[in-house]
Amino acid sequence: MNSRQATYEHLKGIRERKVDNILSSATTIEPSFTISKIIGIMLENDSYDVFCIDKNSVFTINARDLLATRDISKMKVDSLLHKIQPLSKNDTIEKAATMMAHYRMRSAPVVDNDEIIGVVKAKNIVELLAQQNLKWITSNTILTPDPITISSKEHLAKARSVMITKRIDHLPVIQDSKVSHVLTSMHVLQTITPEQRIGSDQKGLNQLRRLESPVGNIGSTRIPKCRTNDSLSTVIESMLKTDTTCCLITLWDNLHGIITYKDLLNLLETKIPSEVPLYIVGLPEDMSNAEIVRTKFQKIIANLTKVYPEVEEARASIKTIHGPVKERQHFEVTLRVITPYRTYNYTEIDWDLSKVFDALGRRIIRNLSKRGKKRWKMSVRKIDKNQIF
C-alpha cells in the first residue's frame, strides 16, 4: 500500500461522515442580479461561491468565473451561471469534497425540499482534517509544484488573464526576487468593483484604469510558509491560524510549491476499488450507464498496467457542458495518468459518455503501451550487457 492509499484509508472516518453535521449558511442570489451586485455580495459575505435555485435546478458562480466579465455594472449574471448537482443532507463528506475539488469550489450547496438549506465549506472540512494525526504525511506529497508567479511590477490585467486561462485563484507576487505576498481572485475582484459615487459613463473607464495599474502591494502578506518536509498537520494548522486558503511551500528559502484547499480536499475524493488508485469525479449519479462508465475506466487502466506497470494513479474528471449551440448536453472528459516519470493528460468531448471513454481508452493504450514496451526493451538490453561482462 503506497502513502496515497494509506492516507485514503486513514481518513475513512471523515469521508463517511454526513454533511448535515457541518452545514453553514449559504450565500444566495437571484439570476436577475447584476455582476457588480454579485461581487458586492461576495465581498460583504466573504464568499467565494454564490448559489441560486431556478426551475428546481441549482446554479452557481464563483469569484474566478466573474473575472472575465466586462460591463459588470449593467450585465446580468444569469447568462454566466452554471448548473451543478447539489448535495442532500444524507450525503457524505467524501462526496462533498469530490464535488468541490471537481468544480473548483470552496462550498457545496445542500438542498432539501427544493430549497438550499446550507452549504458545506471547504474550510469546515479542513478543520476536521486538523483533528486527525497527519504528522506522518509531509507537505511535498500533496503540493502543487512550481506554482505560477507574477511580478509586482506587472499590471493587474495580466494577473486577471493568468487566473482565467490557468484556472487558478492564487498568484504569489515576486518583489526583489522573493515572494512578498499572494494575490487572489477575490483581491482582483475587489479592485475592479466600480465605486458607487462614479457616474455610470465613467465606471467602465475607471475599471480599465485599475486593471492597467501594477499589482504592487495588493494581496495578502499573511500567507503562511512551510518547508517541504513539514507535516501536513503543520500546514493545516498554519492555514487555519492565518485564516488563509493556501500555504506556500519552500525549499532552501526558494518557492517550491503551493498547497490550497483543493489539494487538501483531494485527499478525500471518491476512489474506485482497484489495484491502482482510481478516482472519477463529475460523473452524474442519475445517469443510466454510470456503472458502465466506471467499469470502462477500470478496464482501461487494467489493460494499460499489463504493458505499462509503472502507472501509480489515474483520474477521470467529467465536465458537463450545457450550451445554447448544442441541442443536447455534451461531456468533456480529462483523463490523467500519473507515473514516476511524468503525468499524461488526455481529453475527449462527445454527447455519449460511454463513447468518450472508448476513445480515451484507445488513445491511452496506443500511446503509453508503446512507451512501456520501449522502456522494457531498453531494460532487457542493459541486463544482457551486464551478464556478458
Image (cartoon, grey):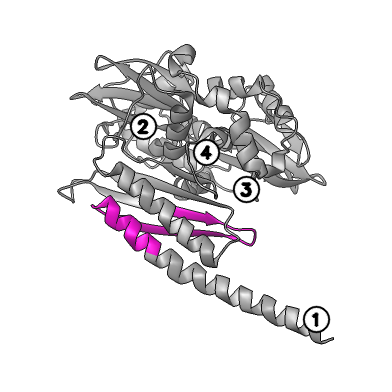
* Residue lying at 35% horizontally and 45% vertically, measured from the top left: 319
Q: In the rendered structure, which disc, 4 or 2, sits on the residue that comes first in sequence?
A: 2
Q: Quadrant of residue 141?
A: top right
Q: Helix or strand or loop: what does disc 1 sit on?
A: helix
Q: Amino acid at mark 4?
A: Asp
Callout 4 crowding tier (Cα within 10 Å): few <14, some 14–19, many ≥20: many
Farthest left residue in view: 327
Q: Residue 21: x percent and y percent?
A: 48, 12
Q: Residue at x 31, y 35 (%)?
A: 285
Residue 107 vertical position relative to residue 355 in the rendered view, above or below: above
Q: Residues within 10 Å of mark 2 (few under 14, many from 20)?
A: many
Q: Which residues are magenta?
A: 335-361
Disc sitting over residue 147 in the figure: 3
357 in the magenta segment: yes
Quick one: 108 or 172, which is closer to the camera? 108
The answer to whether 1 appears left or right of 160 in the picture is: right
Q: Nearer the viewer, mark 3 or mark 1?
A: 1
The residue identified by callout 2 is 61
Which label number is shown at residue 386? 1
Where is mark 4, residue-wise? 169
Q: Residue at x 50, y 19 (%)?
A: 17
Q: Is residue 142 visible?
A: no
Q: Which mark is residue 109?
A: none
Q: CA distance from mark 1 to mark 4?
A: 51 Å
* Closer mark to the observer between disc 2 and disc 1: 1
Q: Amino acid at mark 2?
A: Ile
